[in-house]
Amino acid sequence: MKRILVAGGAGFIGSHLCERLVNEGHYVVCLDNFFTGNKKKVEQLLNNPRFEIAKHDVIEPYFNEVDEIYNLACPASPIHYQVDPIKTIKTSVLGAMNMLGLAKKTNAKILQASTSEVYGEPEVHPQYEEYWGNVNPIGKRSCYNEGKRCAESLFINYHSQHQTKIKIIRIFNTYGPKMDINDGRVISNFVIQALKGKDITIYGDGKQTRSFQYVDDLVEGMIRMMNTDDSFTGPVNIGNPEEYTMLELVSFIIEMTQSKSKLIFLPLPEDDPKRRRPNIELAKKELNNWEPKIKLREGLIKTINYFEKII
Ligand code: NAD
Ligand code: UDP
């Protein structure tokens, strides 16, 4: 049994990760400031003797004896990370420093949840890890993508300067049950709007693409990454290379929910990337042939079933 810290553990991805780690027999400490997460997402773990949850903001130092740290603390939806952009930068940068400081003190292994956003508006398609990205440093998304880029730099430098055992994964768009009703990202928005018969909000012309990964595939990739040899730090892309336009996505959701919702077209947010798709060859090679198992339609059914119950 390992003692594992999950920072941001009461969020969408963190709650799935906590559940999987507790089910594997580990002791899990979940830290969260409950900005976009809440205790309800981990309610089935609250009475488990191998689970504890503490309200803590990662911009403040934290100490606990742990063997592994997963650093997920950071709002991930553009509408949430843009509410207080300075706080978002502090969360990514000071949060990474505090978690790395803890890893250094306790000799724990630490994994950073980085993002495909580090590639910005990519000029290379699909995106592979050696690509440095094309990021607007002063745009609306910069609090998030530059914060995450700085965190990657901190991780790599703790590794080279202090031999901290680090792992960096770049997560591509992930969806599934336990996304917040108010999350604001595309799959939860479209599914909720379709189920409620409300207008479905397409930003721009809907021809922009994303590649959507079901949350269980990501969690499997995260755990495999944590268990790689200490010499492998990443960064490594974790995503599903099936690429769709938002118009294709909405047509699947309308068909699957048999919704009568109409489409409305709203302005495209600033710096919204036009195309995104991961190259996952490195993940396959280093993570024991990891690859996503759940196809978009299958994952959408699970997500639609989830939202049907809670809205
Ligand atoms: P989420 O918003 O549901 O979860 C983030 C969690 O972090 C929440 O519980 C929130 O309350 C907590 N948090 C935020 N700021 C904090 C702070 N200062 N101190 C402590 N806790 C804080 O988002 P998610 O989709 O679960 O994303 C989790 C991580 O994965 C994030 O770091 C995100 O950048 C990364 N990621 C997610 C995606 C995706 O598609 N979901 C893609 C790329 C990267
Ligand atoms: N999007 C949309 N309607 C919505 C929410 C998002 O058309 O109600 C678009 C958004 O402009 C982007 C894509 O869907 O092009 C994915 O957006 P999301 O916020 O889910 O993730 P990100 O832009 O961070 O990849």
Image: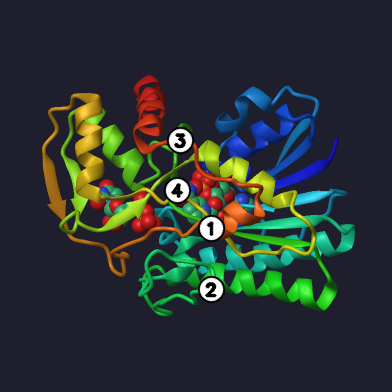
Alpha carbon of mark 1 to alpha carbon of mark 2: how far?
12 Å
Residue 276: image quadrant is bottom left
Query: Which of disc 3 and disc 2 is earlier in sequence?
Result: 2
Alpha carbon of mark 1 to alpha carbon of mark 4: how far?
11 Å
Assess mark 3: CB under 8 A from ligand 1?
no
Q: Residues within 10 Å of mark 4 (few under 14, many from 20)?
A: many
Residue 299: image quadrant is top left
Specify the label residue 130 is tagged with. Answer: 2
Query: Which of disc 2 and disc 1 is earlier in sequence?
Result: 2
Query: Which of disc 3 and disc 4 is earlier in sequence?
Result: 4
**Residue 61 in the figure: left or right of residue 176:** right
Disc 4 and disc 3 in contact, CB within 8 angstroms: yes
Query: Which of disc 4 and disc 1 is earlier in sequence?
Result: 4
Residue 41: image quadrant is top right
Which image quadrant: the N terminus? top right
Query: Which of disc 4 and disc 2 is earlier in sequence?
Result: 2
Residue at (27% x, 63% y) in the render: 269
Which of discs 1 and 2 lies nearer the camera? The answer is 1
Q: Secondary structure at mark 4?
A: loop
Q: Secondary structure at mark 2?
A: loop
Query: Does residue 253 sit above or below 122 in this rendering?
Result: above
Q: Residue flagged by tag 4: what amino acid is it?
A: Asn
Name the residue beneath numbered marker 1.
281
Specify the label residue 240 is tagged with. Answer: 4
Q: Residues within 10 Å of mark 2 (few under 14, many from 20)?
A: few
The number of discs equals 4
Name the residue beneath numbered marker 3.
294
